[in-house]
């Protein structure tokens, strides 16, 4: 039976580019389709040389054709020319929410460029993952929580705002630089989560002395020059403290919700004071507490509370917010972070992965915060 081109295009419409996350037909990546009796040839134009997903995309095209009964196909790839790339950028721009109107100035920096996340009607929830001290698992929680939200069908991205100790790319297993198309930075995607990090732009082990305005500029670029598309969640892995990143974040992302990660030992009062001080300083609401390394289940099946117990609940009570989740201590979580395959991907039915799934559901159920701005309240 002869195959017609329309059928082929219909099948190709189901194929999404793994990084741009839109249909390859809509993006103009399908250059040509040829049909000869029961044989189909497809030429796909990639956005850039060195495009990371060449093989995956070829495979997806072949499978989409097989799904409609086209067993004999030949998928070839080329690279877009400048005109095609410009057209692609226009399409990406058209698909991006427009930036908000606010201008971002008051922190003593030069005027900033607005990002899409400033729009008051933006559907993107912005979750700032913070902690009272280092090493409690912020980055591990950010990544696994992001993957759990993506599993719920949400579009999720992480900004590694920890410019000193960036670790998100390694945990996600991304070792390539972002693709740059004209003036758009395309965030690499791993495990269905987009990510941008200072780690992509500086040499490893190269010490950087960041000054406030530089940090501010970097965050601005992450938010404005990166092609985020339509996101449900933007997760920020924040550095500890009330420093410049938090201030810039508050300015650029005034709708952010803060989640505090803590361990179970009881230092609730001190951590609460620090977190509350930080939140007040940057005028953002704390929405919940996530307790990490809550317990360890031994081979004997017994629960061991290695770092004590109750710290998460105490902190939540102190801050008057809910305890959103308790994540067990498991060696696989650390190993996942070391080898770039997070536990939520490598062992999705484990107790730990389920605890991240539950955390993601709690966050969904919590819903976005209603923005409270004292200057907007009726006096
Ligand atoms: N639930 C857990 N079980 C086992 N290991 C964990 C767990 N959570 C985090 N870790 C490990 O603890 C270490 C610190 O975690 P992580 O880097 O996520 O913390 P962080 O708060 O982001 O640290 P920093 O303040 O340095 O940015 C890492 O080696 C990580 O793999
Ligand atoms: Mg970290």
Image (cartoon, grey):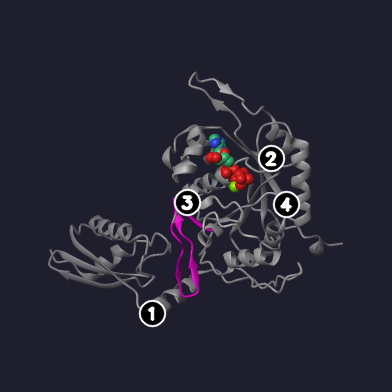
Q: Which residue is mark 3?
A: 153
Q: Nearer the viewer, residue 147 or 33?
A: 147
Q: Which quadrant of the figure contains the C terminus?
A: bottom right
In whole angstroms, how far apart are the C-alphas of marks 4 and 3? Answer: 26 Å
**Secondary structure at numbered mark 3:** loop
Mark 3: few, some, or many residues within 10 Å (few <14, many ≥20)?
A: few
Q: Nearer the viewer, mark 1 or mark 3?
A: 1
Q: Nearer the viewer, residue 364 or 314?
A: 314
Q: Position of residue 193 (x, y in %)?
A: 48, 53
Figure quadrant of residue 53: bottom left
Disc 4 residue: CB within 8 Å of ligand 1: no
**Secondary structure at numbered mark 4:** loop
Image: magenta residue range: 176-197
Figure quadrant of residue 321: top right
Residue at 15% x, 64% y: name it.
Answer: 39
- Single out the residue that lies furthest toward the right: 379
In whole angstroms, how far apart are the C-alphas of marks 1 and 3? Answer: 34 Å
In whole angstroms, how far apart are the C-alphas of marks 4 and 1? Answer: 45 Å
Dot label at residue 82: 1
Q: Which residue is mark 4?
A: 285
Q: Is residue 305 left or right of residue 177?
A: right
**Residue 39 counted in the magenta span:** no
Q: Position of residue 365 (x, y in %)?
A: 60, 45
Dot label at residue 322: 2
């Amino acid at each position: 039976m002869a195959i017609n081109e329309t059928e082929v295009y219909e099948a190709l419409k189901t194929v999404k580019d793994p990084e741009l996350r839109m249909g390859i037909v809509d993006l103009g990546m399908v250059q040509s389709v040829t049909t000869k009796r029961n044989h189909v040839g497809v030429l796909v134009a990639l956005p850039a040389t060195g495009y990371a997903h060449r093989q995956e995309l070829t495979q997806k095209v072949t499978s989409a054709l097989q799904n409609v009964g086209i067993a004999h196909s030949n998928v070839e790839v080329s690279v877009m020319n400048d005109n095609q790339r410009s057209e692609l950028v226009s399409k990406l721009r058209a698909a991006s929410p427009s930036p908000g109107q606010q201008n971002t100035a008051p922190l003593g920096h030069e005027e900033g460029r607005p990002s899409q996340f400033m729009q008051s009607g933006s559907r993107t929830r912005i979750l700032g993952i913070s902690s009272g001290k280092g090493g409690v698992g912020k980055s591990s929680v950010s990544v696994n929580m992001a993957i759990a939200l993506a599993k719920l069908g949400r579009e999720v991205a992480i900004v590694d705002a920890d410019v000193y100790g960036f670790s998100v790319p390694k945990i996600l297993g991304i070792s390539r630089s972002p693709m740059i198309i004209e003036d758009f930075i395309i965030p690499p995607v791993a495990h269905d989560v987009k990510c941008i990090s200072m780690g992509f732009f500086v040499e490893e082990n190269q010490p950087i002395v960041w000054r406030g305005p530089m940090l501010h500029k970097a965050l601005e670029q992450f938010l404005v020059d990166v092609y985020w598309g339509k996101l449900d969640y933007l997760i920020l892995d924040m550095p500890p403290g009330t420093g410049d990143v938090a201030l810039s974040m508050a300015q650029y992302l005034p709708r952010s919700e803060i989640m505090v990660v803590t361990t179970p030992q009881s230092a609730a009062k001190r951590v609460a004071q620090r977190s509350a001080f930080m939140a007040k300083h940057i005028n953002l609401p704390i929405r919940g507490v996530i307790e990490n390394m809550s317990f360890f289940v031994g081979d004997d099946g017994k629960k061991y509370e290695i770092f004590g117990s109750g710290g998460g609940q105490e902190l939540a009570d102190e801050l008057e917010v809910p305890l959103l989740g308790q994540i067990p201590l498991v060696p696989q979580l650390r190993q996942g972070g070391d080898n770039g395959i997070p536990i939520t991907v490598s062992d999705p039915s484990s107790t730990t992965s389920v605890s991240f799934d539950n955390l993601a559901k709690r966050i969904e159920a919590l819903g976005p915060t209603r923005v409270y701005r004292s200057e907007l309240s009726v006096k």
